[in-house]
Amino acid sequence: MSPMSSGSLPQPTSRRPSWRWPSSWGGDGARRGELCALRWADVNWPRRVLTIARSLTEIDGVASEGPTKSHQRRDVALDDALLALLTKRRADQESYAAVVGQPRG
């Protein structure tokens, strides 16, 4: 069983913690590039909504950010499980940043 399927994430260390988007989350059919382009600012915690507004692509080894395939932003409701997972991931990321002395981003 992977750490994601058990609902637990690795404890922060001096190494950057690895994390994957939960494969069990069907969401609204978000594409991999859209998930890679997400930022914490895209999460509206009080409304429990994730906004998908951009996509990350790689062409000839160069990453670039652009619009979604439909060129439209969309909001995805966050259920309790995904909201808890994102809350935990953000706390882990902040702990890691404190260890290595980098601001969160």
Image (spheres, grey):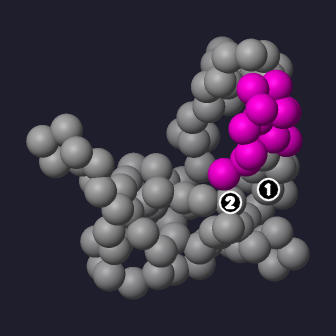
In the image, is residue 97 part of the stretch drawn in magenta? yes
Residue at 29%, 56% (x, y): give it: 64
- For residue 52, side relative to residue 65 (left or right): right
In the image, is residue 81 part of the stretch drawn in magenta? no
Residue at 67%, 67% (x, y): give it: 41
Whether residue 9 is visible here, answered yes or no, is no
Regarding mark 2 in the picture, which secondary structure is present there?
helix
Q: Quadrant of residue 103?
A: top right
Type of amino acid under label 1 = Leu
The circle drawn on residue 40 is: 2
Taking depth in this image into account, of 11 and 26 the one nearest to the observer is 11
Residue lying farthest to the left in this orientation:
60
Q: Is residue 77 above or below residue 15?
A: below
Residue at 46%, 50% (x, y): give it: 36
Taking depth in this image into account, of 61 and 70 the one nearest to the observer is 61
Q: Residue 25 appears at what percent x and percent y?
A: 59, 49
Whether residue 41 is visible here, answered yes or no, is yes
Q: From mark 1 to mark 2, how far is it between C-alphas?
A: 12 Å
Q: Residue 21 appears at what percent x and percent y?
A: 57, 42
Which mark is first along the chain, 2 or 1?
Answer: 2
What span is in magenta?
91-105
Q: Residue 82 appears at what percent x and percent y?
A: 74, 52
